[in-house]
Amino acid sequence: MKKRIIVSGCLVASIACSSAIAKVYEIVWPAHEVKPAREVIHIPEPVAGAMEQQGQSQSKTIIIGIVPDRMQFDKELITVKAGQKVTLELENPDGMQHNLVIVKPGTLDKVGAAADAMARDPKGAQQHYVPKMPEVLFATKLLNPEEVVTLTFTAPAQPGDYPFVCTFPGHWRMMKGIMKVVK
Ligand SMILES: [Cu+2]
């Protein structure tokens, strides 16, 4: 369905214009040939539903820093909407390596234990100390001091409290917070 707008030119203006031309060229412009200008513009009708949806899925940018020498993220709670596109920027001004891993609700201890076990795994560092298990949803790489990384993901559809944690062995008991997913 399209809206149709008809723009009609002013007949008086057209006559004024043609009489001006007639003066310059000394010709007579026959009155019956003066027709109003006519233009048809098609404007697509805005779909209200689509606009609402756009508002809901609007992406969110979150910046999380690491507090130097404190073994802590600078935020303990972040909130996102279910299904929302999230851009999470992690900044590491600390003197050691860290990462940020988002896990399923209620699985922090399990993932933390698996992360600690990776300290004995020769390939642990290579895998950025991110345990390979279904409880892990999203993870950054291991950041060196002064490094910044961006993690983009779609927030879970299921509302709940999703822990975020650093899985560098030994860090998870201190470096943690909650990503609250709301409707
Ligand atoms: Cu850490």
Image (spheres, rainbow, N blue to C red):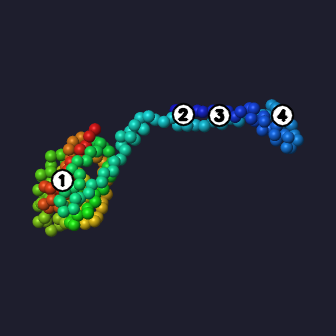
Q: Is residue 70 above or below residue 162?
A: below
Mark 4 and mark 2 in contact? Answer it, CB < 8 Å: no
* SS assignment at label 3: strand
Q: Amino acid at mark 2?
A: Lys
First-in-chain label (3 vs 1): 3
Gap in angstroms between the C-alphas marked 4 and 1 = 85 Å
Closer to viewer: mark 3 or mark 2: 3
Indicate which disc residue 2 carries: 2
Residue 92 quadrant: bottom left
Closer to viewer: mark 1 or mark 2: 1
Residue 20 quadrant: top right
Q: Amino acid at mark 1?
A: Lys
- The residue at the far bottom in this view is 122
Residue closest to the eye, 27 or 138: 27
**Residue 180 placed where, x, y %?**
23, 44
Residue bearing mark 3: 7
Q: Is residue 111 above or below residue 39?
A: below
Q: Is residue 129 visible?
A: no
Q: Residues within 10 Å of mark 2 (few under 14, many from 20)?
A: few
Residue bearing mark 4: 30
Closer to viewer: mark 4 or mark 2: 4
Residue 22 appears left or right of 139: right
Q: Residue at the spot x=58%, y=37% of the render?
A: 42
Gap in angstroms between the C-alphas marked 4 and 2 = 37 Å
Q: Amino acid at mark 4?
A: Pro
Mark 3 and mark 2 in contact? Answer it, CB < 8 Å: no
Q: Amino acid at mark 3?
A: Val
Residue closest to the eye, 134 or 95: 95
Gap in angstroms between the C-alphas marked 3 and 2 = 16 Å
Gap in angstroms between the C-alphas marked 3 and 1 = 63 Å
